[in-house]
Each structure stands twice: as structure tokens, then as C-alpha cells.
Image: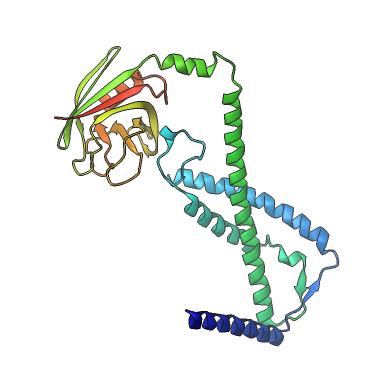
Amino acid sequence: MKLEKLWQGLIVVAACLGLGWLGSRVGAEIVPDPDWEEAFWARFEYMFVFAVLIERSVEVYLIASQQNGDDRFATKQQKSGNDATRAANAAAIVLSILVALAGVRLLSTLGEPASQNSITTIIWFGSDIVVSAGLMAGGSVLFHEVAEVLRGGIGSLSTRFEPDGASKGLRNANHQSEYTVTVTRTGDIGKLEFSSGSVSLNETCYLDPNVTIAAGTYVNCSKTRMISKKDSVTGELRPSIYLPDAVAPGTDNHSIFIHEGTDASGFGGCIVLDRTKMRAMWDEIQPTDGRNVTVKVIDA
């Protein structure tokens, strides 16, 4: 281990000496611009505007391609476990490099290389592109974090200071309307029963026999929409009932829903029901995200 660290130290020293030699050969020296301070801050503000534009455009592209992750302030029912951080950062870096290549660069405001050597020019402008693109990409990530914090804070304050009898009271009143869904399983086929108002279901549903949630009674379930799956007809986010306490076997993923479909394979333990019947049940349940549905899963 000591020998390995020694070699690493020698490599670093050799790299520094090599860079120093290269600098001396290409005439590495920067002639400062006499008005660099004014130009620097003007360009810095300009780049901030581009960082904001990059952040907004990345968000739109991720949503359009269904790669956007969960909003950190979304309710538990709305979360799907998707994390778009890596995709968002990669997209921001690519866009920032393109913008820097187009001319939005920061180091050029500080001065120019004293030498006109081609190697010096390549190093200087290459560094300018890397530094400028990194600043804009980092700025877009920072702006995204600030925007989410502000949005979540405003939502939290509006909920905290709402008057008695407003939405909180209404939500509690709605909880008096309780709904029960019973699913009796037999392998990959089940029987789903639901009765409320004019809707009465006793329908075949589908389950993946290789990925089955535990039998039992799941409370605080909710009518909601899946964040990354679409309705097969309307193209809107797919109507569903979320089971917050149900866990896919062998994982810690709380991602179990009752939703439309004709085959449960590939849905990670979800319960699948004919679209027409699913929509009738979903329309009957009120309100959205009400935590007023009980799902009973029984093994026949």
C-alpha cells in the first residue's frame, strides 16, 4: 500500500513537471484586459440567464420523454421512485457545452494569451469552454434546486395557514366516504369486488404470480394517477389506486397500484383490471389522494 502511494505521488509530481515544461514551451502567459472586471460581471450575468434557460428546457425535454423524476414535494401516492438527476445533469452539460462553443464564454473576458502559438490557443479556448460550460450547467442545477425549494415552501405555507373548515376540513369530511376493494387471488387470475353508489363490480383481474404482494388489508389507499404510465386511450397519466403500504417482494419499493390492463406481467406486483371497469371504479371514488380506500387482498 505504501509503495502504491509512493508511485501515485511520483506520477502527480511528474505530471506537474510535464505541464510546467509544456507551459514554458508554448509561452503560457495571459495578458489581462484592462477593463476585465466590468466585462467579467456582465458576462457572468449573461451566463446566469442561459443557466436558467437551460434548466427550464431540460425539464421540458425530460417530461416530454417521460424521463422526469419525482418532485421532492410530491405526495407519497404520487411518487414512482424515479430519479432523473443523472439524465438532467447530462442534458444540462451537453446544452451548456453547445452554448459555450457558440460563444458564451467567461475566461475570454479576463484577457488573451500573450503567445499566438496554436497549442496555447487550443489550451486557452478549450479551458474557456470547459469552465464556462461547467458554470452554466452547475447554475442550471442550482436554479432547479432553488425553484423546487421555493415551490415546496409556498405549498407548505399555504397548507399551514389555510383557515379552519377550508381544504383541511373538506378533506377530513371526504374521509367519511370510505371505499373497499376486495381482491381474491388464484395464481395469475383474481376476482376484484367493489360496490359504491351505482357502481358494483365483481370482475376478473390479473396478477403476476412471480411477483405477489403479501395478503392482508391495506388501509389509507388512494385514487390517484401514475406518474410515468399513460392511459391507453386518452394518453393522460394513468388512473389508478395506490397502495402505500404494499411492497414488491424482494425490494423496498412502495410502487403497487391497481390500474388498467389485460396482463400483469412486467408491472412489478400491481393488480390489473379491464380499463372500462377500472375507470368506472376510479370515477366513483372521491376525492383524489383521499387516503380513504381500503384494499383487501385474499388468497383463495
* x and y, in percent, of residue 22 in the image: 66, 85
Q: How is the image coloured?
A: rainbow
Lateral position of residue 27 relative to residue 183, left or right: right
In the displayed orientation, state which residue is furthest to the right.
34
Q: Work out whether residue 185 or residue 277 is closer to the camera in this orientation and state it.
A: 185
Q: Residue at x 35, y 44 (%)?
A: 252
Q: Work out whether residue 176 or residue 239 is closer to the camera in this orientation and state it.
A: 176
Q: Residue at x 54, y 49 (%)?
A: 58
Q: Quadrant of residue 106?
A: bottom right
Q: Is residue 208 visible?
A: yes
Whether 283 is drawn above or below 143: the answer is: above
Q: Is residue 102 visible?
A: no
State the quadrant of the C terminus.
top left
Whether 68 is drawn above or below 130: the answer is: above
Q: Quadrant of residue 289?
A: top left
* x and y, in percent, of residue 290 in the image: 41, 23
Lateral position of residue 162 relative to residue 3, left or right: right
* x and y, in percent, of residue 163 in the image: 59, 16
* x and y, in percent, of residue 116 in the image: 73, 81
Q: Work out whether residue 179 or residue 123 is closer to the camera in this orientation and state it.
A: 179
Whether 202 is drawn above or below 138: the answer is: above
Number of marks in the image? 0
